[in-house]
Amino acid sequence: MTSRPYVHAFAALAALLATAAHADTTIYKCVDADGRIEFTDTPKRNCKSLDLPSTIVAPPKARSGPATGAGRAPTPAAAAPADFPKVSSYQQKGRDDERRAILNEELRNEEKKLAELRREFNGGEPERQGNERNYAKYQERVVQLKDSIGRAEKNIDALKREIANIK
């Protein structure tokens, strides 16, 4: 059995979380014949109880909502490291223009695909193909076409939203 540091860190974290949830429960560390480690609150064969602190104070949960409010101090802005690369507004505008062009091309391709799918779907009655002598096979293709149309419409909506979000 090889010792891996991340296994021990995970074990410690699991034990702490389990202890935080049930402070009065004993946690057992079990190792099977293959060397796999399991943490449990029920004693099993080849298990040892862990000596953990009985009280763990959990950090306060982050509140959602506005950064400032009644009784709350403003949250400090995240400071970028001194060596963090900076991009000029000219470079960013170029990147945004390139992104917009790519998204517009994807939008055109998706709209073409949607038009082709709608033409093939033919209002819910696409032409039967030679390999569709079985009506169930035909119905399966109709359902697949309908699903493909729905996906294409969702893709178009997402691309339009993404283009609108570019500054």
Image (cartoon, helix red, strand yellow):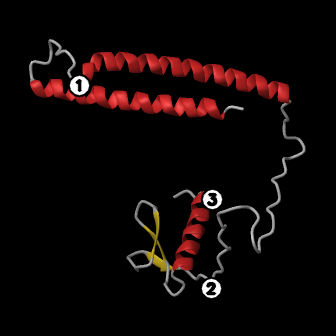
Specify whether 34 is left or right of 83.
left
Please report whichever mark, 3 or 2, sits nearer to the chain's N-terminal start: 3
When the figure is inspected, residue 160 is found, relative to residue 13, above or below; the finding is above
Mark 3 highlights which residue? 5
The amino acid at mark 1 is Gly
Mark 2 highlights which residue? 55
Picture quadrant where residue 19 is located: bottom right
Q: Residues within 10 Å of mark 3 (few under 14, many from 20)?
A: few
When the figure is inspected, residue 31 is found, relative to residue 34, above or below; the finding is below
Please report whichever mark, 1 or 2, sits nearer to the chain's N-terminal start: 2
The amino acid at mark 3 is Pro
- Residue at 20% across / 29% down in the picture? 140
Mark 1 highlights which residue? 124
The amino acid at mark 2 is Thr
Residue 11 at what x, y percent from top left? 56, 67
Q: Which is nearer the eye, 6 or 151?
A: 151
